[in-house]
Image (cartoon, rainbow, N blue to C red):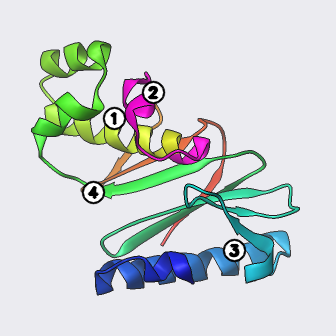
Amino acid sequence: NYHINSYHDLKRMEASLHTWQHLMLVLRRDYQIDLTDDIIEFKSNGKPDLIQSPYHFSLSHSDQYGAILIGRQACGIDLQKEFDNLKLATKILNDVEKKEFEETRFKVEYLNKKWVAKEAYGKALGVGLNHEVYQSLVSIDNTLKIDNYYLACYPNEEFVIEVL
């Protein structure tokens, strides 16, 4: 798979492979869809999608964990190990969020939640993280912290999420 081979780091490549394998298992088990190269389309931005299917999916992995999201509309998921690079705030937060960031006592948590929420939003739109996504006001209400990992899905609806 081209997507897996695009990683230069062996650990990231393995995590991506395991996440894709889990997606194949869930699609077969729960949706009776056999994931083959001829039913996956990679958009110009690299976002994978199912051809001629009512379902959409999104994948994410961080360290040894992976997450998949399957829905009936375009969706995005992001899983990220906690980071403490607060300098990213100037890059990924819009003016409203920068003010909130400065006022919170929980800067690391706030920034991590915004990061995964915006990453999930960008994946759902099929654009990734870009200037428009950074400037968007994305809610962190449904962003989860699990141990030292953060997880967000977009749109904020009921989904079945499997973390592996």
- Mark 2 and 4 residues: CB-CB less than 8 Å, in contact? no
Mark closer to the chain start, 2 or 3: 3
Q: Which is nearer the N-term, disc 1 or disc 3?
A: 3
Numbered disc in front, either 2 or 3: 2
Element assignment for label 4: loop
Residue in the picture at 24% in, 16% down: 100
**Residue underneath mark 1:** 114
Q: Residue at x 59, y 83 (%)?
A: 21
Q: Earlier in the sequence, mark 2 or mark 4?
A: 2
Q: Is residue 25 visible?
A: yes
Identify the amino acid type marked 4. Asp
Q: Residues within 10 Å of mark 2 (few under 14, many from 20)?
A: many
Residue linked to disc 2: 138
Check the image and report above or below for 155 versus 95. below
Q: Earlier in the sequence, mark 2 or mark 1?
A: 1
Q: Position of residue 46 (x, y in %)?
A: 55, 61
Mark earlier in primary sequence (3, 4): 3
Magenta-colored stretch includes residue 106? no
Separation of residues labelled 2 and 1 (CA atoms): 7 Å
Check contact, mark 2 vs mark 1: CB within 8 A.
yes
**Mark 2 → mark 4, Cα distance in angstroms:** 23 Å
Residues at circles 1 and 3 in contact by the CB criterion of under 8 Å? no
Q: Residue under circle 3? A: 26
Q: CA distance from mark 2 to mark 3?
A: 29 Å
Amino acid found under the numbered disc labelled 1: Lys
Q: Observer-nearest residue: 107 or 95?
A: 95
Q: Within the image, what quadrant is residue 124 found in?
A: top right
In the foreground, 5 or 158: 5
Answer whether residue 140 is visible to the viewer in this image.
no
